[in-house]
Amino acid sequence: MTSELNRYRAILHNKRSEIRDGNRSRGTLELQPTADEMDQLQGAQERDLAIGAFDRSAKLLHDVKSALSRIRTGKFGICVDCECDISMRRLGALPWASTCIVCQEEADSRTGEPLRVTEIAFEQAA
């Protein structure tokens, strides 16, 4: 299992670097004053999309850091909700997963959030 943990650690470190590099290359969210109403609308839409992308990458970065912390504390691969093992297939698809698929589905049904694309692919493979 140590070699598996080292593999997951490497994957998570790479993902963390990828997210940080992506955030640096995005630059700042500047508002460009313009008299044209259509340009203003387009600028607002672009800004909203950029903010959404930033929010998603910030959450993913938090999830990756949490997974690295769980590796350090010996809790990686254990569901934070029910304390059952998270399947290797799920960790293979989402190494930063903190919950087993059952707990994730329950959480998603409570919040009304759909499964993420990678979780859907995981479910189809199961």
Image (tube, grey):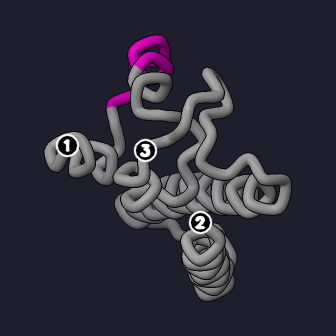
Under circle 3, the secondary element is: loop
Magenta highlight on residue 72 = no
What amino acid type is highlighted by mark number 2?
Answer: Met
31 displayed left or right of 109: right
Q: Which mark is residue 21?
A: none
Q: Which residue is mark 1?
A: 126
Q: Position of residue 54 (x, y in %)?
A: 59, 61
Q: Which residue is mark 3?
A: 87
Q: Nearer the viewer, mark 2 or mark 1?
A: 2
Q: Which mark is residue 1?
A: 2
Q: Which residues are magenta?
A: 106-114
Residue at horizontal 65 percent and vertical 28 percent from the top: 83
What amino acid type is highlighted by mark number 1?
Answer: Ala
Residue at horizontal 74 percent and vertical 60 percent from the top: 71
What amino acid type is highlighted by mark number 3?
Answer: Ser
Residue 24 appears in which quarter of the rendering?
bottom right
Q: Earlier in the sequence, mark 3 or mark 2?
A: 2
Image quarter of the N terminus: bottom right
Q: Position of residue 98 (x, y in %)?
A: 60, 42
Q: Are there few (<14), some (14-19), or many (20+) residues within 10 Å of tag 2?
A: few
Under circle 1, the secondary element is: loop
Image quarter of the C terminus: top left
